[in-house]
């Protein structure tokens, strides 16, 4: 199963990082693969919350639905997503370090169906690099927003 992971050190405690990660209304501001939110919870994320978005990594963009399956405040979240052709598992981890926090996003993709077969072939050539760049830029965007006080 294809997996990409990106980590970054942020000069801020875990709380503002967690607050940004827990507000899906703001995902289009900083999550590279999120173009727009289609449905978000009326309150903050929690275990069992769902949301829908439109996005992806070009040329594979579509609507996806997500379920928060793990929610350990200020430490870890796991979101399971499905766009009909790929099941995704996003693990968000925040750990304290000297001078701030370390944020890690790990994304595991499980392609299925006919498009899944095509994705499995294209993964090493195209998709993995694009997804890694998107993931790297997303955690860099989180760092920029948190360190600028925009959370």
Image (spheres, rainbow, N blue to C red):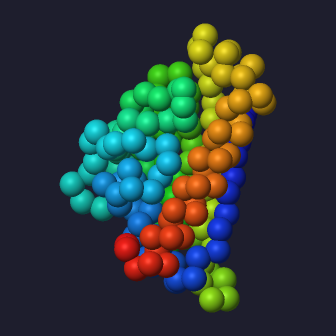
Left or right of 2 on screen, residue 143: left
Q: Residue drawn 78% across and 30% down?
A: 124
Left or right of 6 on screen, residue 91: left
Depth order, front residue of 120/93:
120
Residue 45 drawn at (x, y percent): 35, 58
Residue 73 visible? no
Left or right of 128 on screen, residue 103: left
| The image quarter in which residue 65 lies | top left
Q: Residue drawn 53% across and 22% down?
A: 85
Query: Looking at the image, is 94 positioned above or below residue 130?
Result: below
Residue 17 drawn at (x, y percent): 48, 72
Residue 88 drawn at (x, y percent): 56, 37
Q: Residue drawn 31% across and 54% down?
A: 25
Image quadrant occupied by the C terminus: bottom left
| The image quarter in which residue 97 lies | bottom right
Query: Looking at the image, is 33 positioned above or below residue 101?
Result: above
Q: Residue drawn 44% across and 62% down?
A: 21
Depth order, front residue of 66/28:
28
Image quadrant occupied by the N terminus: top right
Query: Looking at the image, is 25 positioned above or below residue 86?
Result: below
Residue at the outermost right position = 124
Residue at the outermost bottom position = 99
Residue 123 drawn at (x, y percent): 72, 28
């Amino acid at each position: 199963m294809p997996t990409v992971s990106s980590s970054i050190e942020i000069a801020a405690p875990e709380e503002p990082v967690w607050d940004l990660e827990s507000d899906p209304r703001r995902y289009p501001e900083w999550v590279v693969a999120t173009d727009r939110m289609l449905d978000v919870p009326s309150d903050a994320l929690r275990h069992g919350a769902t949301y829908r978005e439109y996005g992806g990594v070009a040329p594979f963009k579509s609507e996806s639905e997500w379920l928060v399956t793990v929610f350990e405040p200020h430490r870890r979240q796991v979101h399971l997503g499905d766009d009909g052709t790929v099941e995704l598992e996003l693990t968000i981890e925040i750990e304290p370090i000297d001078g701030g926090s370390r944020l890690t996003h790990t994304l595991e993709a499980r392609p299925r169906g006919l498009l899944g077969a095509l994705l499995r072939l294209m993964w090493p050539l195209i998709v993995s690099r694009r997804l890694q760049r998107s993931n790297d830029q997303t955690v860099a965007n989180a760092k920029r927003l948190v360190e600028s006080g925009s959370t």
